[in-house]
Image (cartoon, rainbow, N blue to C red):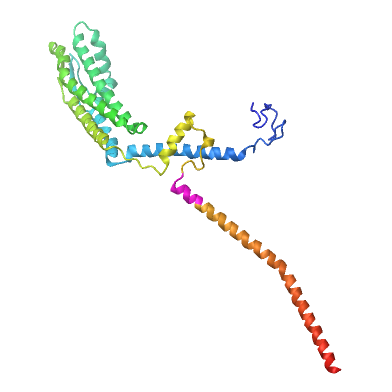
Amino acid sequence: MANCPKCGKKLKFYNVSQFCPNCGVNLRFYDFESTFYREAKYAELSNAAVHVKIRRLKASFIGSKLTIFRIVTILFPLAALLAPAAVFSLSLAFHSEKVSLSGLGLFQAYSSGTLSYILSMRSSSFAGAAFDSFFKLILLYGVAALLAIALAVMTLLCFISIKNMHKIICVVSGVGIIYSVFAFFFMGCIMKPCKDFEMISAEKSFGFLIIALAFAIMLAVNLIIWIKGIPVEYDEGMTERVEIYHKVKKGEIDVDSLPQPVIETAATRKIDEEIAKEKANLLKHNGKSGDEEPLSEEEPASEKSDEGDADKSGEEGDCVGRKEED
């Protein structure tokens, strides 16, 4: 259970009142002002941290024409996977089949059961080496597909590190280019066992070169972003608040030692000016009402003095009239 913030006595679970049973302090409003300012400072800092992340997210996707085009380049390697990298032909006595080494071709071979048959024939003593070569081609193609998917995921997550993510994408794209070119030439060595069997044949196609071209486009775009940088627009004092926020989280700075507002900006100065203006208007209004009240109290006195003067003048007039009669 919680402790009383004033006397430190431990509160029982049945102490549902807002007053401490020991010292009688109001638990809800104890040290309310300092707690209010502490929460206001922390809200100011955490709000700045959230807005910085939103600005970076926005800049990483639509911050410039290059970042927008970078999102489009995700589709290039994925679309290049549809191009056939090789064609594996199987000619049996009662059946013939062609399997294209591409995303769509492998899916069709899997759905028709041809892919399972080819992989099961790897252990065959008659043509196991030829079927095993096709399995190696699938592995070779699978690595290129994984690189394309990895680049797509990293591009979508580029807001995590707006300064370093495009560098990582450049490195992975370069690796993809080298690997695709290597795979294109290495396929000839893998296909050699297929030449020994008339019923099995494999032909090299241009799929890996198209994949390498797609990787090259991604490399070029991210390299330009690396050189030019991504412009991020921050509000005044936003980055300073984030730095202080991280120091507060690490315990390097105490929130109570910070001023309110933590960082003074044009927006906060405008708010302070409006508050000061409202206070001045309120004081001016109260001052006028205070000046009018004494005057209202003095009016009866002045009226009384006027009435007294009138009476005196009347009495003097009567005295003058009597003297004339005499």
Q: Residue at x 13, y 13 (%)?
A: 195
Q: Nearer the viewer, residue 227 or 128?
A: 227
Q: In the drawing, does residue 254 fall left or right of residue 7?
A: left
| Quadrant (top left/top right/bottom left/bottom right) for the C terminus | bottom right
Q: Is residue 24 above or below residue 189?
A: below
Q: Residue at x 19, y 25 (%)?
A: 208
**Residue 185 is a magenta residue:** no
Report which quarter residue 185 is drawn in: top left
Q: Is residue 120 above or below residue 303?
A: above
Could one spot residue 291 in this view of the protein?
yes
Q: Residue at x 55, y 40 (%)?
A: 37
Q: Position of residue 98 (x, y in %)?
A: 19, 20
Q: Nearer the viewer, residue 10 or 136?
A: 10
Q: Is residue 159 above or below residue 269?
A: above
Q: Position of residue 211 (x, y in %)?
A: 21, 27
Q: Position of residue 96 (x, y in %)?
A: 19, 18
The segment highlighted magenta reads 264-272
Q: Which residue extends farthest bottom?
A: 325
| Quadrant (top left/top right/bottom left/bottom right) for the N terminus | top right
Q: Residue at x 32, y 33 (%)?
A: 163
Q: In the drawing, does residue 301 fall left or right of residue 267?
A: right
Q: Is residue 247 above or below residue 85?
A: below
Report which quarter residue 123 is drawn in: top left
Q: In the drawing, does residue 105 fall left or right of residue 285?
A: left
Could one spot residue 199 in this view of the protein?
no
In terms of secondary structure, what is the magenta stretch mainly?
helix
Q: Nearer the viewer, residue 137 or 62?
A: 62
Q: Which residue extends farthest top?
A: 125
Report which quarter residue 169 is drawn in: top left
